[in-house]
Amino acid sequence: MATYKEKVGTAVVNFAGNYPGAVEGELWYDSTNKDFKYQFISPIGAWATGGNLNTGREKGASGGVSNSSALFAGGSPAPSGQTESYNGTSWTEVNDLNSDRDDLTGNGTQTSALIYGGGSTGKTELWNGTNWTEKNDLNTARNQMGGAGVDNTSALAFGGTPAAANTESWNGTNWTEVNDLNTGRNRVGGTGIITSALCVGGAPSPAYTESWNGTNWTEVGDLNSGRNAMGAAGVSNTAVLVFGGSGTSALTELWNGSSWTEVADLSQARDAGGSNGTTTSALFSGGNTSPTAATEEWSGTSTVTKVLTD
C-alpha cells in the first residue's frame, strides 16, 4: 500500500474552498471555511443532470446500455411516434415510429431496439439504428407492461393493463406465451434479459418483486417503498436499480439479488419516464411533471468530500 507521502507528496495544499485538483485521499486546507478536507470515491452512486429531450413527454419507452447511449420513443401528450437518440450530452431527433402511441414498452440498444404494446394495440416495431419496421403483434394487446431484453432479437413482455399476469417471449420473429406472473399488475418496472429478468412494483401491488429464471416467476423481497410507473435499469435479476414512481417519487433503490437498499434520490421527482442502462450507468428521461424534458444520469460511483474533524 502506498503511503500518503508516496501518493501525494508531503505538502498540504492551501485552497479557498473544495480543491478540484485533489486526488483520492489527498488532504488540503480550505482557507475559506478553515477546515482540513479530503475526498474519496464512493461506491454508492449519484444522479447528475443530463441533456434535456427536445420534446418533453411521458409514458414513452427507452432502450440503451448506459447513461451515454439511449433511445427514447413514443409517449404523450397526444400519442406520439417521435424518437430521439442520446449520445451522453444531447438528444437528436431520428425517424419516428410507424404507429403513434403512449404507455408502450421497449428494450434493446441504441442501434438494435424493440418497441411493443401501448395504446390499445399489440403492435411491435423493430429499430435497426435508422428505421422502425413493423413486425408480428403481441398475442395479447395491452399497455403499461414491463419489458426485458438485450436487443431487437430477444425480449420478454410481462404484466400490463388491466392488471395482467401475461408473459410473452420474443425470438426475433414471433411472440410466444410463457408462464404468467404470480400476481397480475400494470405500470410495473421491468428489466433484465429473457432468461434473467425482474418485475418490480406496479398497481395494485406496488411493493411486489418477482424474479424470472427463463421458465418461471418467483416472488422475492419487496421494495422498501411500494410504487408504480418507476424507471428500472439492469441486465439480470440479481443487480437492478429502480427510481422514481407514482406520487412523483424521487426514491432510488438498489437490488442485490436478495434485498433492496435505498440509495441516492433523483434530483427531480417523477414517474412514467423512459429508463435504461445498468446499476452503474443508468438514464431516466422525461416523465410526469407537466410532462418534463429532464434527463438524469446515474453513475454507480461518486466523489465525496469529507471534513477532517477533531
Image (tube, rainbow, N blue to C red):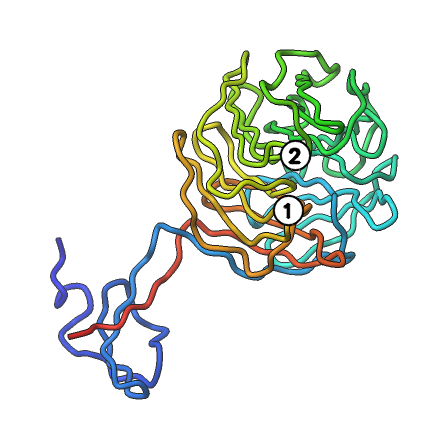
Quadrant location of the C terminus in the rendered image:
bottom left
Residue 76 percent across, percent down from the top left: 81, 48
Q: Amino acid at mark 2?
A: Ala
Instruction: Residue at the far bottom: name it.
Output: 32
Name the one closer to the observer, 51 or 304.
Answer: 304
Name the one closer to the observer, 205 or 156.
Answer: 205
As helix, strand or loop, the secondary structure at mark 2 comes to loop
Q: Quadrant of residue 189 in the image?
A: top right
Q: Are marks 2 and 1 in contact (CB under 8 Å)?
A: yes
- The span from disc 2 to disc 1 (Cα, nearest Å) is 10 Å
In this rendering, the answer to whether 281 lies above or below 302 is above
In this rendering, the answer to whether 118 lies above or below 5 is above
Please state if 85 lies on the left or on the right of 181 as rendered: right
Q: What is the crowding at mark 1: few (fewer than 14 residues within 10 Å), some, or many (at least 20)?
A: many
Which residue shows up at 82% across the image and 46% down it?
82
Which residue shows up at 64% across the image and 21% down it?
154
| Residue beneath disc 2 | 203
Q: Please tell me the numbered disc located at residue 246.
A: 1
Lower position in the chain sequence, tag 2 or tag 1: 2
Count of numbered badges drawn on the protein: 2
